[in-house]
Image (cartoon, grey):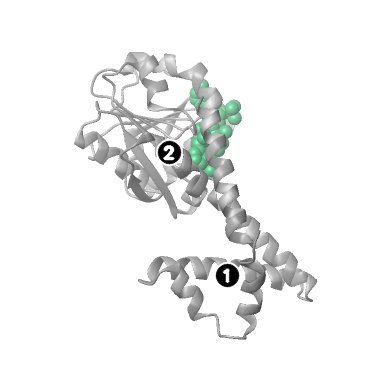
Amino acid sequence: MTSEQRILLVGCGNMGAALLRGWLGQGTAASRICVIDTEPAARAVADELGVAALPTLQSDVAADVIVFAVKPQQLDATLADYRSLAGGDTAVLSIAAGKTIGDFEAVLGHNTAIMRAMPNTPAAIGRGISAVVANAAASAAQRDCAEALLHAVGDVVWLSDERLMDVVTAVSGSGPAYVFLLIEALIAAGERQGLEPALARELAQATVAGAGAYAAESPLDPAELRKQVTSPGGTTQAALAVLMAKGGIEELIDGAVAAATARSRELAG
Ligand SMILES: NC(=O)c1ccc[n+]([C@@H]2O[C@H](COP(=O)([O-])OP(=O)(O)OC[C@H]3O[C@@H](n4cnc5c(N)ncnc54)[C@H](OP(=O)(O)O)[C@@H]3O)[C@@H](O)[C@H]2O)c1
């Protein structure tokens, strides 16, 4: 992203606001950004950050990149309004789940650079990961721009095949919910074994955060790290005998990711 680029952010809800904070935090001038959001409370968020916010697209608004961060069902009613900006040098970056590059090309034309991304909620603290895929019209510079915009809220990986977006959605898009469920279950189990709720929560949260950071930083495979904490006949082994039994966590996660992948395919039509 060059310091001259003008960004139009359509939708400043949970994910849009996380992106906006990320861009400003990385030093993008507020004057380079314009927010469009129909919801007054979302525009107030932009106002507080010193970014101009409008309820609808005005004819004098220009952009080098339009970032769509509205709900997928809201996009259908919105996209045609942006046709006037498409087709030239303006690129589109969408984070709307299930909306394909083809959906955008059908309205904005095949000559428009379209990039489709799937971020996840740790983006709110700059620790997300986004997978992104581009159409043939996107130039290297436009891809770099999209990558820089997403990088403001975490890591970025490129996909060569858009069809992988369904399983990406199932693994990293929905994945934070699986981890939150693991934290919930650890808290509840700790309480059942006698811990005070606040202490159970502190232990469970710190354990998941620490183990995640350790797995990310260590050169070792997660399986190797697991073996390192598992002494023969010890406490961890007693727990893993339950978790790794038939019908245990591996089969459950496998079924969960398969169900989410299938649902993502269904939603994309
Ligand atoms: N949250 C996640 O974990 C996550 C992860 C990956 C991808 N995504 C994708 O990110 C997108 C946004 O999700 P979100 O959770 O941030 O949603 P959100 O909080 O509902 O934000 C969307 C915002 O856009 C506004 N809006 C609706 N129609 C509009 C229009 N025509 N023009 C301008 N603004 C409009 C909404 O206003 P109203 O409230 O008035 O409708 C709302 O303020 C979704 O497509 C989702 O698939 C989210």
Q: Residue furthest front?
A: 246
Label at residue 206: 1
Q: Is residue 144 left or right of residue 92?
A: left
Q: Is residue 110 above or below residue 258?
A: above
| Vertical position of residue 158 compared to residue 187: above or below | above
Q: Position of residue 71 (x, y in %)?
A: 54, 30
Q: Is residue 13 visible?
A: no
Disc number for residue 145: none
Q: Position of residue 228 (x, y in %)?
A: 48, 80
Q: Earlier in the sequence, mark 2 or mark 1?
A: 2
**What is the three-letter code of the residue carrying label 1?**
Ala
Dot 2 amino acid type: Met
Q: Nearer the viewer, residue 242 or 13?
A: 242
Q: Position of residue 268 (x, y in %)?
A: 50, 28
> Is residue 167 visible to us here?
yes
Q: On the rendered structure, is 18 left or right of 161?
A: right
**Residue named by callout 2:** 165
Mark 2 or 1: the one toward you? 2
**Residue at the (30%, 31%) spot, across then down:** 6
Q: Residue at x 57, y 71 (%)?
A: 207
* Residue 50 in picture, x, y percent from top left: 43, 38
- For the point 43% across and 14% down, the residue is 80
Q: Residue at x 30, y 39 (%)?
A: 160
